[in-house]
Image (cartoon, helix red, strand yellow):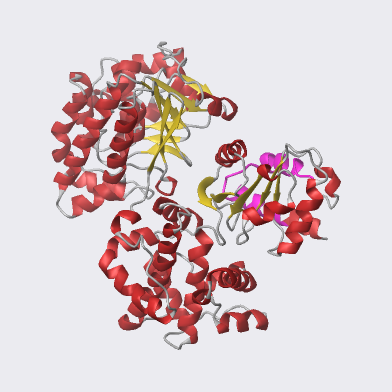
């Protein structure tokens, strides 16, 4: 019965993927063919990884792990999907506890990219490294947290739910008003009561009860939460028509205060970093306004004011790390392996997009590795779906609207200076591209001596399609690899190029599988630039563009032409952006030349229209 229900749920999810054109029916059949449901635990004997996901009962979990430990080999990695129990405590039921680890997935596990990776006190480094790579390989965005009840996300999310019930219990507002205020404050599509209805009220209660048992009175479940669970019925949520500002403010500040107080406690215990809190909230909960965003918007003094009532009511002390410096997200991670340094873009909730904070952290990390005499090679890579998906569009739009384009110019100039340092470094620079590589991301990759890409990676210069042109070397550095004509093709078309085609063009040096990718971190020194000419299909593109100006191409009749698709694409780009890109490529005066036209392009109506259209219907560009 349970196996049939489980398979039906899996098939329903996959069928939804077909309707959304994520999967083909053939792919669904293949996936289902790889699933072997069973109630016979002895069939697990040859498994390499087993993830337990039974309900949150410590005795049940311990019994299961004792049984499994007696069946599988000592090399089998055992993991728990627990959302609340200590991994170190669970490991006591496992023989060879060094192979035990926490892998906490988030609802809906097939769709939600977040997973918390939790090391117990005996988890081995090889097991941890293996799971970090495996989670990324299956499309997850892992955050690393130390072993503590509730880990990272549930530690602040569950009290957020509980505080919403307390506000309702105290008669401050009805459920609909609390939902509205919560969604506005945290930028989420579902409020606390709707989320409890979706995931199950008993789950919320038991998670809060576990935190209460471990951490004390502040975490005590609200009486109405227990009552609602015992009533075995969902919360009744009525449509909210309007909400009084004072009530909205009280709800918003109460929910914010609880969330930030708990996050401060998390930071105090070094359970994770501020960046992990941001990634957890942004990816796992889909909050557009994370606790870190809210802290930095309100400021240290105001946040400390907001948490005072909680400190007094529950006899708590303020966390030591309720200061601005502790709440700076770590977007660039720096790692070292013998004589190899690694710079990792770790902002998957924003597709690793570049903004001033990212540039500052990249510069600091690069300087640290460049000055280390033991480091011979520096690898640049990303976490999540993207290597780097260009510059942060919101940064551009905000400053255009504020008429502070100088901020964009300063940001670009600083980025140019850093990219030039990377380009001319005496260390060997390897770009290990792990996914989507757009605009500034491709410009960064092109500063490397060698570019290696996973086979599913995609490359593009989309700038002229959003009203601007590449400004971090994109009109210059590709010329060294593919020549002027193919550089023009990349910028004029904005075409998304897969890894194989990028390699055939000569834009990158090597395409690798996941199996090969991990091994390159250990010994990248032997990697060399391919320095090969383009394949015949790219020679044909080169020949078509050769000798033609943007004006020639746009005026050329495309009827019955094999190049119709390219000409139509160019016709939808911002005219001034195309003209400037052409001028820069033809002159080939180096990346710094791109700075000359930045103020002009970012003050055009087309730039604002294009940048605001990302993810929407492209505008019709006016050429000014």
Q: Quadrant of the N terminus?
A: bottom right
**Quadrant holding the C terminus:** top left
- Predominant secondary structure in magenta? helix
Residue 193 image point, x, y percent: 52, 74
- In this view of the protein, can residue 620 be seen by the observer? no
Please name the residue shown 47% across and 70% down the image.
160
Left or right of 376: which side holds 65? Answer: right
Front residue of 529/46: it is 46
Residue 552 image-quadrant placement: top left
Q: As drawn, is 515 to the left or to the right of 310? A: right
Q: Is residue 22 magenta?
A: yes
Residue interval drawn in magenta: 9-37
Task: Find residue 408 and report its image quarter.
Answer: top left
Q: Does residue 271 appear to the left or right of 553 in the view shown?
A: right
Q: Residue shown at 36%/62% (left/top)?
A: 320
Above or below, comparing residue 78 to residue 596 in the picture: below
Q: For the point 39% across and 66% down, which residue is it?
A: 260
Residue 196 sits in quarter: bottom right
């Amino acid at each position: 019965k349970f196996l049939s229900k489980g398979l039906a749920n899996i098939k329903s999810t996959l069928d939804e993927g077909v309707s959304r054109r994520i999967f083909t029916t053939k792919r669904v059949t293949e996936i289902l063919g790889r699933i072997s449901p069973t109630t016979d635990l002895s069939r697990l004997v040859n498994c390499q990884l087993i993830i337990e996901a039974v309900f949150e009962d410590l005795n049940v979990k311990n019994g299961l792990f004792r049984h499994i430990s007696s069946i599988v080999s000592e090399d089998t990695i055992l993991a728990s999907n627990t959302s609340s129990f200590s991994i170190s405590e669970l490991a006591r039921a496992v023989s060879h506890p060094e192979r035990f680890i926490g892998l906490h997935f988030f609802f809906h596990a097939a769709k939600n990219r977040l997973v918390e990776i939790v090391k117990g006190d005996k988890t081995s480094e090889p097991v941890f490294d293996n799971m970090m790579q495996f989670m990324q390989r299956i499309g997850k965005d892992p955050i690393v947290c130390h072993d503590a009840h509730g880990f990272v996300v549930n530690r602040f999310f569950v009290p957020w739910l509980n505080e919403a019930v307390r506000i309702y219990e105290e008669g401050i507002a009805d459920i609909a008003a609390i939902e509205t205020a919560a969604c506005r404050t945290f930028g989420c599509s579902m409020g606390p009561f709707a989320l409890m209805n979706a995931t199950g009220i008993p789950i919320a209660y038991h998670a809060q009860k576990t935190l209460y048992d471990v951490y004390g009175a502040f975490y005590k479940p609200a009486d109405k939460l227990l009552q609602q669970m015992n009533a075995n019925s969902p919360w009744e949520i009525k449509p909210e028509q309007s909400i009084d500002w004072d009530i909205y403010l009280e709800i918003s500040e109460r929910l914010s205060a609880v969330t930030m107080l708990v996050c401060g406690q998390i930071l105090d215990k070094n359970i994770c970093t501020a960046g992990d809190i941001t990634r957890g909230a942004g990816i796992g909960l889909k909050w557009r306004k994370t606790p870190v965003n809210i802290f930095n918007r309100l400021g240290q003094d105001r946040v400390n004011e907001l948490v005072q009532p909680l400190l007094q009511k529950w006899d708590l002390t303020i966390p030591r790390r309720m200061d601005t410096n502790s709440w700076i997200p770590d977007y660039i991670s720096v790692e070292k392996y013998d004589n190899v340094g690694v710079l990792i873009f770790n902002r998957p909730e924003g597709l690793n997009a570049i903004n001033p904070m990212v540039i500052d952290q990249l510069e600091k990390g690069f300087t640290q590795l460049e000055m280390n005499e033991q480091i011979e090679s520096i690898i640049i890579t990303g976490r999540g779906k993207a290597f780097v998906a260009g510059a942060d569009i919101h940064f551009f739009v905000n400053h255009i609207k504020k008429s502070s384009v100088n901020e964009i110019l300063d940001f670009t100039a600083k980025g140019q200076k850093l990219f030039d340092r990377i380009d001319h470094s005496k260390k060997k620079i390897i770009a290990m591209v792990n996914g989507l590589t757009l605009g500034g991301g491709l410009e960064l990759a092109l500063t490397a001596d060698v570019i290696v890409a996973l086979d599913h990676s995609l490359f593009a210069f989309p700038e002229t399609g959003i009203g601007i042109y590449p400004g971090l070397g994109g009109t210059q550095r590709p010329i060294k690899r593919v020549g002027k004509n193919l550089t023009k093709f990349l910028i004029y078309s904005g075409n998304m190029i897969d890894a194989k085609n990028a390699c055939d063009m000569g834009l990158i040096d090597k395409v690798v599988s996941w199996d090969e990718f991990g091994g390159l971190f250990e010994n990248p020194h032997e990697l060399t630039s391919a320095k090969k000419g383009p394949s015949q299909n790219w020679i044909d593109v080169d020949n078509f563009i050769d000798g033609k100006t943007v004006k020639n191409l746009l005026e050329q009749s495309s009827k019955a032409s094999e190049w119709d698709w390219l000409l139509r694409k160019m016709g939808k780009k911002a005219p001034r952006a195309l003209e400037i890109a052409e001028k820069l490529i033809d002159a080939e005066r180096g990346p710094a030349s791109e700075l000359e036209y930045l103020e002009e392009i970012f003050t055009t109506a087309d730039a604002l229209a294009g940048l605001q259209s990302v993810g929407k219907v492209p505008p019709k560009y006016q050429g000014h």
